[in-house]
Amino acid sequence: MKIEFRNVTFYYKKSEVVLDNLSFTIEDGTMTAIIGHNGSGKSTIAKLIIGLLEPVSGEIYLNDELLTIDNLDEMRAKMGIIFQNPDNQFVGSTVKDDIAFGLENRLIEREEMIRRIEKYSRLVNMEEYLEKNPENLSGGQKQRVAIAGVLAMESDLIIFDESTSMLDPKGTKEINKTIKSLKNMNNGKTIISITHELEEALYADRILVLNGGKIVLDGSPSDVLPKKDILEASGLKVIDGLSLIEDLKKIDFESKDVILEAIWESIFTM
Amino acid sequence: MGINFYDVDFTYDVKASKTLKNINLKINKENEFITILGHTGSGKSTLVQLMNALNLPNKGVVEVAGIKILPNNKEMLKPVRRHVGLVFQFPEYQLFEETVLKDVMFGPKNFDKNNADVELSAKQALKMVSLDESLYERSPFNLSGGQMRRVAIAGILASNPDILVLDEPTVGLDPKGKTDLMEMLVEIQKETNKSVIIITHDMNVVAKYSKRCIVLDDGKIVYDGGKREMFENSELLKNHNLDLPDISKVANSLKNKGLITFEALPLTKDELFNVITRGDENE
Ligand SMILES: Nc1ncnc2c1ncn2[C@@H]1O[C@H](COP(=O)(O)OP(=O)(O)OP(=O)(O)O)[C@@H](O)[C@H]1O
Ligand SMILES: Nc1ncnc2c1ncn2[C@@H]1O[C@H](COP(=O)(O)OP(=O)(O)OP(=O)(O)O)[C@@H](O)[C@H]1O
Ligand SMILES: [Mg+2]
Ligand SMILES: [Mg+2]
């Protein structure tokens, strides 16, 4: 799904502008990471895209069609979002009902529904918890269930709002792989990943950095992540590996170029 | 003093299998910097909720500040929670007042200080987590995720317990906020010797800050020791869904290419820096 923001301004309170005349386009079938300091407006952008919030001024186009109250339901049926707090997501009293609820909403037939519940609960390793109440799960288990529920809808656009932040390292790797495979399918999904883990943003085709209601950096991971000055001015940091390269550049040592090149490579081919 | 577990079992549902099994643990009141690690659902949050009597053991004894935690003993709650302050995994569960400032004041007020002091320590705590003053009068529920996390952490800091326990405190914080929080905890320990216990999945945090790692797997403690020994045990990492810090992965890839050699695996940026530049001096 193609997404376009045209001069979008948004605030919750007039005196505190969150998004300031923001314009950008996300192409169909791509994976974009949005990063920015706490309160920079990442979740707000997500809520605007799914029509939970409305721009104060400016327009949002989805697949080149202006998003309005009239086509909101139709558009929403093509989008899925995993909210920052999985508890805001759960509606069912069992994991199974919870995944089913979204599918029922989309008028998926019963047999297909059962197939998907099985497939996606297995994909996130929660197939043994189908009869449990999502409220009584551990933090990481809740995130897994929330992810399964949204993946099961097989939407064109999927927004992940810090949705792997509580998984163990192995789980994070597995989910990231799954996300990547979604994008690489033939009718590739469009993925937006909001994250504070810059190592995770490495998986994206493109990174947008938000600060002061504007996009201050926009490019591939290897373009954006080394931009120390702008990242720091935006309340962010460079990752350890890149900051090591910075430190090493300042001094002389044996086979310097080869080592710097090898560090760079090991970061961007993880 | 401190926290002691003697043969503790815990279960949420007596019909299901135990959530924690035969836990024995001794945590000193002073100068511990413990990271609790382990796979999703291994029992980490359950364990720390036993440390301040939010969960009660089904078997065995938990002792906090010399007090045995027993069912139906309301009197013990105050001294126990005075000793051990806990920040929840989901900050939303901790927030409930009308405004941010009132929320942070709730903890210290509970330990009956006079009102002027309470407001002062609340404001100090909010400064420590770098929450903008313009947000003090806002409802804590109209904040971004990371801002809520900061308020929840400030609530514990303001109460000034002897031991700080934080359940995945860096989740939701931006990269600078994460570093600032960790450095602040180090600073607090330097000044007051308070023990700090955090649950985390972030191996970079473990590499930089942990003095002692406790690894849980399926309700059992499977490792309790130093981080270096843990990170050098690749079987252990693999068996319990753990991983190396990012810098160690870089170090291994340089080693595999024959560019550097080392005995002890570098865990942090500074350590790898030294390995790379020391190689030069030896030539
Ligand atoms: N319901 C609300 N009412 C008023 N202000 C709000 C509300 N929700 C968010 N805000 C404010 O809008 C700004 C942007 O919030 P948003 O949740 O989009 O940030 P974010 O980039 O997702 O941050 P985080 O990394 O902490 O999740 C913040 O300053 C926040 O305090
Ligand atoms: N309130 C509850 N009622 C019933 N079972 C629960 C409850 N809370 C947790 N559990 C179960 O107990 C086990 C341990 O959960 P706990 O929250 O302690 O895990 P954790 O190690 O903190 O995991 P995570 O890293 O995902 O947060 C899990 O299998 C979970 O499903
Ligand atoms: Mg957010
Ligand atoms: Mg937990």
Image: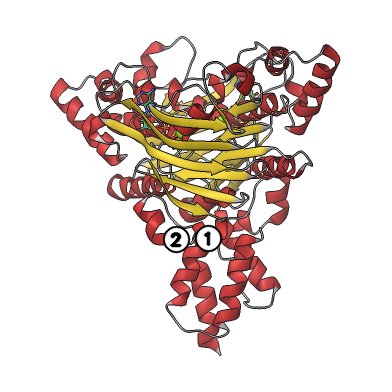
Q: Amino acid at mark 1?
A: Asp
Residue under pointer 2: A227
Q: Position of residue B222 (x, y in %)?
A: 66, 42
Task: Ligand 4: give its quadrant.
Answer: top right
Q: Residue at x 61, y 29 (%)?
A: A143
In the picture provided, is B219 more to the left or to the right than B276? right
Q: Nearer the viewer, residue B12 or A206?
A: A206
Between the residue at mark 1 and the residue at mark 2, the CA separation in whole angstroms equals 7 Å
Query: Ligand 1: does it lie within 8 Å of the C-beta at label 1?
Result: no
Q: Nearer the viewer, residue B139 or A75?
A: A75
Q: Quadrant of the C terminus of chain B?
A: bottom right
Q: How is the image coloured?
A: secondary structure
Q: Nearer the viewer, residue A269 or B38?
A: A269
One can see residue B65 in this view = no
Element under label 1?
Answer: helix
Q: Residue furthest left?
A: B116
Q: Residue at x 63, y 27 (%)?
A: A79
Q: Nearer the viewer, residue A118 or B265?
A: A118
The circle on residue A223 is 1
| Residue B77 figure quarter | top left
Q: Position of residue A56 (x, y in %)?
A: 38, 26
Q: Amino acid at mark 2?
A: Lys
- Given contact means CB atoms under 8 Å apart, are the residues at marks 1 and 2 in contact? yes
Q: Residue at x 50, y 25 (%)?
A: B49
Q: Quadrant of the N terminus of chain B?
A: top left
As drawn, B275 above or below A68? below
In the picture provided, is A123 more to the left or to the right than A20? right
As drawn, B203 above or below A140? below
Element under label 2?
Answer: loop
